[in-house]
Amino acid sequence: MKRKIISILLCICIFASLLPVISVTASAKTFSEVVAWMDSKNGKALDFDGKWGAQCVDYFNYYLKEVWGISNPINKYPVKYAKQIFDYAAPSGWQKISGSGNYRVGDVIIWNGTSSSVSGHVGIVYSVSGSTVKVSQQNYNKMMYVTVQNLHSPNLIRGVFRPPLEEDKPVNLPAHATTQNVLPGTYRLINASSGYYMNYAVGGLSGVSGYKPIIMSKPDDTPEQNFRLEYVSAGKYALKITHSDGGAVNIYRGSGSTQAGDPLSQWSYSGSDYQLFYITPVSGGYILQSASNPNMVVATPNNEWHAQLKLAKYVENDKKQIWTLDFPNKLPFVDAESGKYYWDALRWAYYCNITGGTDATHFSPNAKCTREQVMTFIWTAYGKPEPKSTANPFKDVKAGKYYVKPILWAVENGITGGVSDDKFGVGETCTRAQVVTFLYAAAGRPITLFQINPFKDVKTTDYFYKPVLWALQKGVTGGTSTTTFGPNETCTRAQVVTFLYNAVAK
């Protein structure tokens, strides 16, 4: 028995010796990964050794451990003062460079002390833009937490430790639209990472002079948090400021061409590409690509309240670069109540200029909706496309009326016809079945699979049979009960807006 066991063990050992030796090394780091790590620490107080509070050396030790996998950096750099770090060798694979000079992101800068501050200092290069170098550091100027500041005291720099960073891997940016893909309107832009809202800083920002910055702030429904997206051409939008100061969001270019780190500010609108953006859909929302350099997108550099927005290289799935679009949470109509089934739909319709009220302060949600009104709603929601022909066969569609183009476009695209060859039916109210059929036709009459018909009042021979099943499956509307659709019931203004919102915007 023992011989058999020994024989098996020998076979295992021989087989194992034939296997290739696999060495495990820390994965290479890119510049964007290092910046993302610094962003995650900004504003935090980091005490690595638990002895003297949040010191600059503590931040250095966290950098070595969390980014570079050096398990016990205190043993490698058993220093009393930050300046002494440079007395040791750089980590394996890093460069040790004496003196000050050219810097790059991720470099560890070590400063000498002075007669009044003998300990020196250590920080990490956060960004380099021309001659401007920003450093991520802790306990700078007695700030016992991580901040990003301009490079200081270059005459005191002993040198740098330079890590072996790689260039960011090329990312295929989503193809931005060359035509309008978001309805023009008044929006609130919400950052997917922080949940804060894009905001126009009316009073400026501490440390920023000469222009009023675009920042992040908590939601408060003020005009400063509302931006009007205006479609210009070729997929480009302007972000107009709704505050009484006016103007538009502009990229502040220190070098004359847009690049990473350029901040966003308010400026009078001129329509140049430095003020225009592609609103490009991605998973989880949209990215705002600079029209002058589509490789750069609007991002919040960190999740701080009041952080100024800047351009950054696009990084796939980086939530700091992703925005969701919402609408102001108030309406001018005294008869439209928050919490009603139509509230979100009406906010969308009002702020995208799909509909207004029956007067300045009333929406009239329960008023009946007419055929020309429904056509106008649908036409506007689809971007107000021009009809190909101006020929008008309907006697009751009078020239100069608001609904002429919507009706001609709808008839031209098979969304509806007239109630007769020469009459459209202006002023006639619409039923639930008719509105759903219009929306189904506008959507291209999609095929609806595996949808059971629960409604006793919807027959396979009805003209609205397929539209109702489509509307049910897509969530455009349900029935008036679990077993009835109510096809002949009149559709109200609130219902039409809700159906349209569910069909087009959700």
Image: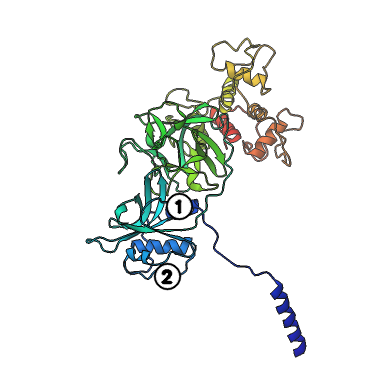
Residue type marked 2: Lys
Could you tell me if the residues under marks 1 and 2 are in contact, i.e. CB atoms within 8 Å?
A: no
- Image quadrant where one finds the C terminus: top right
Quarter where residue 206 is shown: top left
Asked if residue 108 shows in the view, the reply is yes
Residue 476 image offset from top left, x and y in percent: 62, 36
Which residue is labeled 2 in the image? 76
Residue at 66 percent across and 19 percent down: it is 411
Residue type marked 1: Val
Quarter where residue 464 is shown: top right
* Residue at the farthest left position: 116
Residue 460 image offset from top left, x and y in percent: 76, 32
Quarter where residue 244 is shown: top left
Residue 311 image offset from top left, x and y in percent: 45, 41
Residue 101: assigned label: none
Which residue is labeled 1 in the image? 35
Residue 109 image offset from top left, x and y in percent: 37, 57
Say which element carries label 2: helix
> Which label lies toward us, 1 or 2?
2
Front-most of residues 147 and 505: 147
Cα separation, mark 1 vs mark 2, equals: 24 Å
Q: What count of labels does the image hold?
A: 2
Front-most of residues 282 and 342: 282
